[in-house]
Image (cartoon, grey):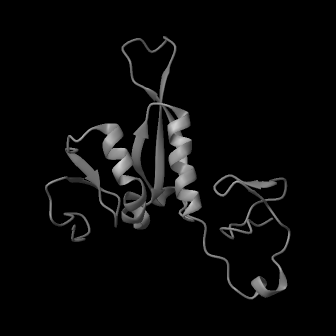
């Protein structure tokens, strides 16, 4: 089974691509079968882009990225609290490929800045290697990537 949009391959039994929200197909049309399918983004290559307090806001951001053909996923995390047995509060994170971080930021950056406020983050994820880097750094100390 294959996604006709992102060309990801799925095991039998899956009927929809969760990233692109389209029905899977058994085979690509003849003119597309000669083109190799791009590799699906491995989970280890995804980095947190930003968090949302509502699932609706996270879905809206993910849908914006889908319209631009940028892969992303939503991760639901429990917010740590003092009582581990209390009803869990959740936060919703958009995760994106590390190499696509700047493209995502160009699409969602302004909206996220408004939502999260104008305070700069103390650290960010490097767009090349996804390691944590201080927001004031000009170069990534892990991989050497230059920041704009």
Q: Position of residue 51 (x, y in %)?
A: 41, 39
| Whether residue 38 is situated above or below residue 21 in the rendered picture | below
* Quadrant for the N terminus in the image: bottom right
Residue at coordinates 74% horizontally, 69% vertically from top-left?
4
Residue at coordinates 34% horizontally, 51% vertically from top-left?
110
| Whether residue 101 is situated above or below residue 39 in the rendered picture | above
Q: How many marks?
A: 0
Residue at coordinates 32% horizontally, 38% vertically from top-left?
116
Q: Position of residue 148 (x, y in %)?
A: 21, 68
Q: Position of residue 124 (x, y in %)?
A: 27, 51
Residue at coordinates 76% horizontally, 67% vertically from top-left?
2
Left or right placement of residue 92 versus residue 82 in this view: right
Q: Nearer the viewer, residue 122 or 13?
A: 122
Q: Nearer the viewer, residue 14 or 71?
A: 71
Q: Position of residue 16 (x, y in %)?
A: 77, 54
Left or right placement of residue 77 versus residue 10 in this view: left
Q: Nearer the viewer, residue 15 or 52?
A: 52
| Whether residue 142 is situated above or below residue 121 in the rendered picture | below
Left or right placement of residue 83 versus residue 54 in this view: left
Q: Nearer the viewer, residue 96 or 55?
A: 55
């Amino acid at each position: 089974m294959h996604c006709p949009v992102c060309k990801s391959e799925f095991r039998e039994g899956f009927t929809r691509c969760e990233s692109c929200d389209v029905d899977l197909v058994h085979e690509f049309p003849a003119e597309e079968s000669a083109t190799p399918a791009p590799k699906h983004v491995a989970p280890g290559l995804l980095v947190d882009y930003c968090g949302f307090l509502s699932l609706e806001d996270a879905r809206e951001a993910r849908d914006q990225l889908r319209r631009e053909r940028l892969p992303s996923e939503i991760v639901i995390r429990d917010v740590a609290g003092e009582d581990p047995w209390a009803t869990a509060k959740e936060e919703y994170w958009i995760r994106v490929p590390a190499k696509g971080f700047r493209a995502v930021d160009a699409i969602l950056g302004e909206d996220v800045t408004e939502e999260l406020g104008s305070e700069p983050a103390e650290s960010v994820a490097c767009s090349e290697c996804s390691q944590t880097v201080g927001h004031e750094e000009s170069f990534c100390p892990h991989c050497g990537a230059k920041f704009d």
